Image (cartoon, grey):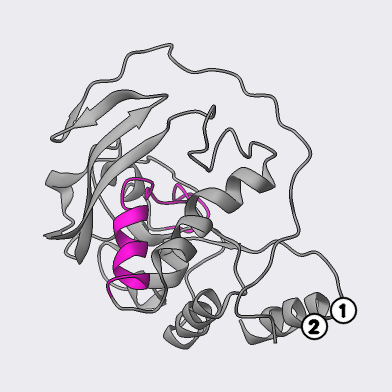
C-alpha cells in the first residue's frame, strides 16, 4: 500500500492529475476475514490486505489522497458465494451499496476524522465531476436534479441481514454498529424510499449525457 501512495503523492506534487478511488471493504475489512468456514463471502478482486494496509488506506483517505469512495457492488447471494471454496470458482465481489453511507459516516464523521463537506465530496460531488455529470448531479443548485436523502446522523444501529434490501440478502459488515442512517430518499424530487419501504416505480430512469469531466480539484490537506 505504501508504494502506490508514495507514487500518487509524488506525481501530484509534479502536477499530474491522478484520480484515486477506494471502497468501504478495503477501508474497513482485512484479510483475517479470509479464514474460517465463511471465508468465501469475502473473496473479491483485488483481495483483502493486511490490517496495516487498511490503516494506511484510512490515513490516506483522511489526509486527502483519495478522491472517491464508492462500491463495486456485486449482489451474489450467500448461497452463491459459499458454493465453492476454490478461489478460481468463487463468485468474486461483495455487496455494499446500501451500507456505503452509514459506514463512511461512522468512520469519517462520527469519529471526527473528517467534516460533512469532505464526506459529501467523496461520495457525491467528486464522482459527479469525474463522470461529467456535474452540476446536474452532485449538487442541489437551482435547476439541477433534486436527488437527495434525509439522513439522521445520530441514529445508532447495527447492520445485519434483516436490514439489507439487496438481492444478496447478506452483508459483509453484519454485526457492525454504525452511527447514521438514511431515513428518506428522493429521486428528482419524488420520494422513493421512506420508513424502510421502497416506493419507486420501474422504468423511471433517464439518460444523462456526460460532459467534459472535471478532474482537477483541490486536495484541501495537500498531497505529500
Looking at the image, residue 143 lies above or below residue 55: above
State the image coordinates of residue 164 (x, y, percent, origin top left).
Answer: 21, 43
From this view, report whether residue 190 is shown above or below residue 153: above
Q: Which residue matches tag 1?
A: 14
Left or right: where does residue 127 sit relative to residue 6? left
Residue 60 percent coordinates (x, y): 56, 79
Q: Badge 1: how crowded within 10 Å, few (<14), some, or many (20+)? A: few
Q: Is residue 141 left or right of residue 211?
A: left
SS at mark 2?
helix
Residue 186 location (% of width, % of height): 33, 30
Q: Which circle, 2 or 1, is nearer the viewer?
A: 1
Q: Quadrant of the C terminus?
A: bottom right
Where does the N terminus fall, quadrant-wise? bottom right
Place of residue 43 in the rendered image (x, y in percent of width and height, measured from the top left): 43, 59
Q: Which mark is residue 131?
A: none
Dominant SS of magenta comes to loop
Which residue is denoted by mark 2 in the rendering? 10
**Is disc 1 placed on a helix, strand or loop?**
loop
Please say whether residue 85 is visible from this viewpoint.
yes
**Residue at the image position 63 percent from the left and 23 percent from the top:** 208
Whether the magenta-drawn stretch holds residue 185 is answered as no
Q: Residue furthest front?
A: 142
Q: CA distance from mark 2 to mark 1?
A: 6 Å
Q: Nearer the viewer, residue 125 or 93?
A: 125
Q: Do the residues bearing badges 2 and 1 touch, measured as CB atoms within 8 Å?
A: yes
| Residue 39 in sight in this render | no
Position above or below: 157 against 135: below
Q: Which residues are magenta?
A: 86-110
Which picture quadrant has residue 200?
top left
Q: Which residue: 76% across, 80% down?
A: 7
Which residue: 65% across, 64% down? Answer: 20
| Residue 202 image-quadrant placement | top left
Amino acid at each position: 500500500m505504501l508504494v502506490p501512495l508514495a507514487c500518487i503523492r509524488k506525481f501530484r506534487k509534479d502536477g499530474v492529475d491522478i484520480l484515486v478511488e477506494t471502497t468501504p471493504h478495503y477501508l474497513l475489512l482485512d484479510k483475517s476475514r479470509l479464514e474460517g468456514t465463511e471465508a468465501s463471502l469475502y473473496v473479491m478482486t483485488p483481495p483483502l490486505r493486511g490490517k496495516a494496509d487498511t490503516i494506511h488506506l484510512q490515513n490516506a483517505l483522511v489526509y486527502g489522497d483519495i478522491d472517491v469512495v464508492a462500491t463495486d457492488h456485486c449482489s451474489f447471494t450467500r448461497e452463491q458465494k459459499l458454493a465453492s471454496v476454490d478461489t478460481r470458482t468463487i463468485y468474486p465481489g461483495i455487496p455494499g451499496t446500501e451500507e456505503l453511507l452509514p459506514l463512511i459516516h461512522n468512520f469519517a464523521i462520527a469519529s471526527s476524522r473528517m467534516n460533512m463537506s469532505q464526506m459529501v465530496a467523496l461520495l457525491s460531488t467528486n464522482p459527479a465531476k469525474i463522470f461529467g455529470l456535474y452540476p446536474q448531479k452532485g449538487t442541489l443548485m437551482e435547476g439541477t436534479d433534486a436527488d437527495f436523502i434525509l439522513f439522521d446522523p445520530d441514529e445508532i444501529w447495527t447492520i445485519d441481514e434483516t436490514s439489507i434490501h439487496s438481492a444478496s440478502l447478506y452483508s459483509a459488515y453484519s454485526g457492525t454498529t454504525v452511527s447514521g442512517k438514511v431515513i428518506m430518499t428522493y429521486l428528482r424530487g419524488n420520494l422513493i424510499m421512506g420508513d424502510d419501504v421502497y416506493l419507486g416505480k420501474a422504468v423511471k430512469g433517464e439518460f444523462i449525457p456526460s460532459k467534459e469531466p472535471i478532474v482537477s480539484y483541490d486536495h484541501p490537506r495537500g498531497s505529500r
